[in-house]
């Protein structure tokens, strides 16, 4: 049932091109977004003055990408919070709030509790989930299925990329509903989305080189992920993946924060994964890399093709093709999933069933 792969996680990583295609089919057009079970119209959007995105773990990271994209394309303020925090803090939520929850399983206890709380206060709830008929799908007013297919490995991979895909669709949809997204942007981003299966395929093609990097470094005790803008969220996800299945202590930092503390942790040999796909901050990332290199770090970077100036500054670099900055989170995370996977294998860990973790967290 692992389809010839050693682990479900690896199988699911390789299923991502198809999963993305299934997420987009029938929904993504150059001039419109069609979401069957999302019944928000322009009128309802006008009545919404607050959007909150609430989820746990990996799904929460997809929510952060969602916040960035909704604010960018629809120009509405969005708050994000882990469901376990939201449900216990008397959140500002009322009939003018749209709560978006994200959950692969559709059964996560904290996320479900957040829905119930928000609904009690009159909010509208939109769920992005992978499991048809799950509790979360049933209790939400609107549902957007990720269509990723069953995900067995505890470490979420194809669910994440499809959640990010759904968030991108939703951000464009909201942008259209409130007249904030122009025709050119629609064309550009929807065509970028359509390329994601091929872009993921290309990232998968680099697996040998990633494996090599992982096998050279698997004995490390700590590793750090740095990025800015959308890359920062990818870093949070890469860091979670690494700690979850390889048990290597790891953290993710917004690269601009390094100077405010974390750089004190960088010593000779410290592994730093630098995600540098956002054009507007590429030079700033290059500076951050120089600073950690000056302290002896070993740097693996991910950047867009055309940025050859990064080559002499790092120990290993993976290039992704030129694409819109809003699309990069989808292929980029694949490198970090593979890195976590091979670190886990090299360390002899139980990849699909990491210690202390369950696939679905149905109790607090
Ligand atoms: O089923 P959900 O998406 O609600 O699960 C949320 C988290 O428990 C989940 O994403 C967890 O963080 C994963 N194991 C990460 O790989």
Image (tube, grey):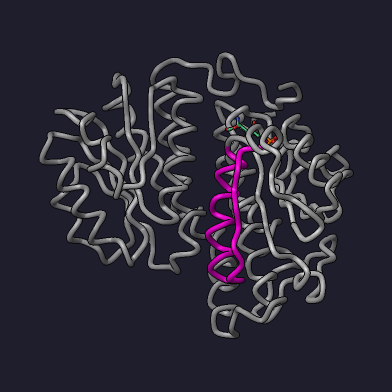
Figure check: 236 above or below 232: above
- Residue 124 in the image: state x and y as whole percent: 82, 55
* Secondary structure, magenta segment, majority class: helix
The residue under the point 48% across, 32% down is 240
Q: Is residue 147 visible?
A: no
The residue under the point 52% across, 54% down is 330
Would you say residue 67 sits in the magenta stretch?
yes
- Residue 129 in the image: state x and y as whole percent: 74, 46
Would you say residue 176 sits in the magenta stretch?
no
Name the foreground residue: 83 vs 323.
Answer: 83
The residue under the point 27% across, 35% down is 262
Figure check: 343 above or below 146: above
The stretch of residues the image draws in magenta is: 58-83
* The quadrant where residue 315 appears: top left
> Where does the C terminus fall, quadrant-wise?
top right
Figure check: 170 above or below 364: below
* The quadrant where residue 116 appears: top right
Name the foreground residue: 82 vs 241.
Answer: 82
Quadrant of ligand 1: it is top right
- Residue 146 in the image: state x and y as whole percent: 72, 51
Left-right relation of 113 to 312? right
Q: Residue furthest bottom?
A: 183
* The quadrant where residue 180 appears: bottom right
Q: Is residue 283 visible?
A: yes
């Amino acid at each position: 049932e692992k389809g010839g792969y050693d682990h479900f996680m690896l199988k699911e990583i390789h299923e991502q091109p198809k999963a993305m295609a299934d997420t987009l089919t029938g929904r993504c057009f150059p001039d419109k977004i069609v979401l069957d079970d999302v019944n928000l119209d322009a009128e309802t959007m006008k009545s919404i003055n607050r959007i909150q995105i609430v989820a746990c773990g990996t799904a929460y990271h997809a929510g952060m990408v969602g916040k960035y994209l909704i604010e960018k394309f629809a120009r509405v303020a969005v708050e994000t919070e882990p469901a376990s925090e939201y449900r216990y803090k008397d959140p500002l939520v009322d009939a003018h709030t749209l709560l978006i929850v994200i959950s692969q399983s559709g059964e996560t206890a904290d996320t479900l509790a957040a829905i119930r709380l928000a609904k009690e206060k009159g909010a509208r709830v939109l769920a992005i989930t992978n499991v048809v008929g799950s509790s979360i799908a049933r209790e939400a007013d609107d549902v957007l299925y990720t269509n990723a297919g069953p995900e067995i490995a505890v470490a979420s991979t194809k669910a994440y990329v499809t959640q990010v895909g759904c968030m991108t669709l939703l951000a464009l949809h909201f942008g259209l509903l409130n007249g904030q997204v122009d025709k050119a942007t629609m064309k550009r981003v929807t065509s970028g989305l359509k390329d994601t299966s091929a872009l993921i395929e290309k990232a998968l093609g680099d697996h040998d080189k990633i494996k090599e990097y992982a096998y050279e470094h698997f004995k490390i005790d700590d590793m750090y992920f740095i990025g800015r803008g959308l890359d920062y969220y990818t870093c949070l996800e890469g860091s979670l993946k690494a700690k979850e299945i390889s048990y290597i202590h790891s953290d993710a930092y917004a690269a601009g924060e390094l100077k405010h503390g974390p750089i004190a942790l960088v010593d000779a040999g410290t592994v730093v994964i630098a995600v540098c796909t956002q054009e507007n901050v590429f030079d700033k990332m290059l500076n951050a890399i120089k600073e950690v290199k000056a302290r002896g770090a070993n740097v693996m970077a991910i950047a867009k093709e055309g940025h050859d100036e990064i080559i002499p500054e790092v120990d290993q670099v993976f290039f992704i093709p030129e694409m819109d900055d809003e699309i990069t989170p989808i292929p980029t995370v694949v490198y970090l999933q593979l890195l976590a996977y091979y670190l886990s294998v090299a360390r002899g860990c139980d990849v699909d069933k990491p210690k202390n973790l369950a696939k679905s967290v149905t109790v607090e």
